[in-house]
Amino acid sequence: ITIDVGAQQGVEVAPDLWGLFIEDLNDALDGGLNAECLRNGDFEFNAADRDGWDALTAWSADVADRVEVRTDAPIHPNNAHYLRLTGPVTLVNEGWDGTGTSDGQGFLLSFFARAGAEPARLTVTIGSNGGSLARAQVMVPAGGWHRCETTLTAVADGRGRLHIEIPAGLVVDLDHVSLRPTGPGGEPLTFRPDLLQALKDLSPSFIRFPGGCVAHGLGLDNIYHWKTTIGPRHERAQIPNSWGYHQSRQIGYLEYFELCQATGATPLPVVAAGVCCQNYPGGAQAIADDAMDAYIQDVLDLIEFANGSADTLWGARRAALGHPEPFRLRYLGLGNEDEITDDFRDRYARIEDAVRGRHPEICVIGTVGPQPFGPDFEAGWAFARARGTAMVDEHGYRNPRWFHQNVDRYRTYEPGPQVYLGEYAARSNTLRSALAEAAYMIGLERNPGVVRLASYAPLLARVGHAQWTPDLIYFTATEVLPSASYHVQGMFSRERGTRLHPVTLGGVEPEPVTLPETGSVRLMSQGASVDYADIVLDGLVRHPVTTDPGGEPVELGGIDPAAATLELTATRRAGDEGFVVELGGDSYLQVHVGAWQNRSTLVI
Ligand code: AHR
């Protein structure tokens, strides 16, 4: 092979190109980056989060009937449930697969408690197999709700659970229980240190938050409203997570901005474009016409919260929360993979016009659907071009071969809106997929006139609790397990190219490809719709298809007739990449399936 490197072109690589996408799915935040060790410390889990969940999820007691869930006179209306404990009783929290400790590690335990006429002394322990990894006592003053806290210091490495002992004869109300590791000055940590370090090591130029689907939510009540996530933690609005669990919002907008500061990244918040996610059972719904002015004001207030001086209303709020200096917001995402409907066009245009009018310095990023092709992609692009939108957010979850085949995708884009490749990953999470991403990333680097920003997605996944694969960084309660793709991202981001040179390869002959005889495969989804499926025969991508629930089967040509006799029903389980059917010899049929939910059944 010969490689000829030509003279530098007069073009610089996009300076903000490599960033991070963070969304609370796969327990990425609660149970992950959020350093909180307890699960359901507010007793606010409920059946709207997940069937069977309630205020006591993740809690147990040695004497169950000494624990009562109450809602009268709570600590805050947004934190309506609390426990009344009648001693003697010991309450135990299972944490997120336990709480990891290391010898000498400090923890700050805090809670709101209400004792009777006498003060109460509670014993708290991080316990493991009957032994104690850390122990302390906390005094609860008499009468009314009080915030109480104590420090525990671990005496050994281990993994334990928090026990709270209420002595006999005492009745204590308890809410907003929190256990956080402490930093060098004894301060409770916001972010889990090893995961934070893994993000810092990626040297991100920007961080996109809070999603993803979470940004526009499942239903109007589920849209992520930033103002409800910046106050004291026990007062924040907790809502169901569109990925089937609970959002405590302990990492809310304030902490997202702090995460950007901690990693040196520019914030890239994404707000709903006035419509919720179209995957909501009722379809995409638009914020009512007469509520739009208030919603638009919320978006303008977000910019003021991030950038306004402390003399402004929202700049003063930021300063009061400990940040007199602005967060230096430059980008704002508007919408996420939305269906391009008339309601979307109307709401999007009103918000974008308002931001452009008041804040021409902010780059508004539009949305062009969930796939790098298809009706919403075409309609989204046409809409963005017509509006002169500065940048659009493209997404692309495809198989590794697609990434190799599309390395030059951006070379032929017409002038117009620039591209933020906001979510992409080569499916399968192997070295092969990481190499495919690396090839594709060179294509991103080489077209800075088009591609300005890019972020792999999703970022984080707790082992055994992923709703989506592949992910960049896996973790357990005590380990960080980066994927091969993580090392690719780090390599590109830390060792940034800055100038472009033409490169010519010589001496490489492509291998001839032989396609098999024709036949057919029927593919039909049952249950939820399937948003993409690639039929692969012997490693060759044959047809990307999209199916609707109960829709017409898709007939595909180009498959060996012997395979056409196959009849099987397979159900995708979380974490599966697809189905593989051995056809005999070296042949196999592989179906890569991506569904919005993991409950789709395919008939092949
Ligand atoms: O990254 C996971 C999900 O993929 C995002 O929430 C959504 O935008 C996309 O469909």
Image: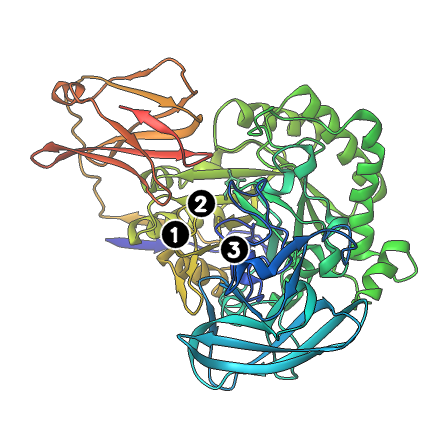
**Image position of 259 (left or right of 507):** right
Q: Which mark is on residue 28?
A: 3
Q: Is residue 390 visible?
A: no
In-image side of 75 versus 559 (left or right): right
Asked if ligand 1 lies within 8 A of label 3, the reply is no
At a point 40% along the width and 58% down the height, the residue shown is 488
Q: Which residue, as the protein is rendered here, is positioned at the far left? A: 585
Please, what secondary structure does the residue beneath circle 1 have? helix
Q: Upstream in the sequence, badge 1 or badge 3?
A: 3
- Label 2, secondary structure: give it: loop
Residue 115 position in % (x across, y down): 74, 70
Tell which circle, 1 or 2, labels the residue nearer the N-terminal end: 1
Q: Is residue 133 above or below residue 408?
A: below
- Give whichever of 36, 565 is nearer the camera: 36
Q: Quarter of the image holding residue 33?
A: bottom right
Q: Nearer the viewer, residue 397 or 58?
A: 58
Q: N-terminal of the two: label 2 or label 3?
A: 3
User: Label 3 near label 2: C-beta < 8 Å?
Assistant: no
Q: Amino acid at mark 3?
A: Ala
For ligand 1, tell me if the residue under mark 2 lies within 8 Å.
Answer: no
Real-space Cα distance between discs 2 and 3? 11 Å
Q: Mark 1 highlights which residue?
A: 438
What quarter of the picture does the C terminus occupy? top left
Q: Amino acid at mark 1?
A: Ala
Single out the residue that lies furthest toward the front: 169
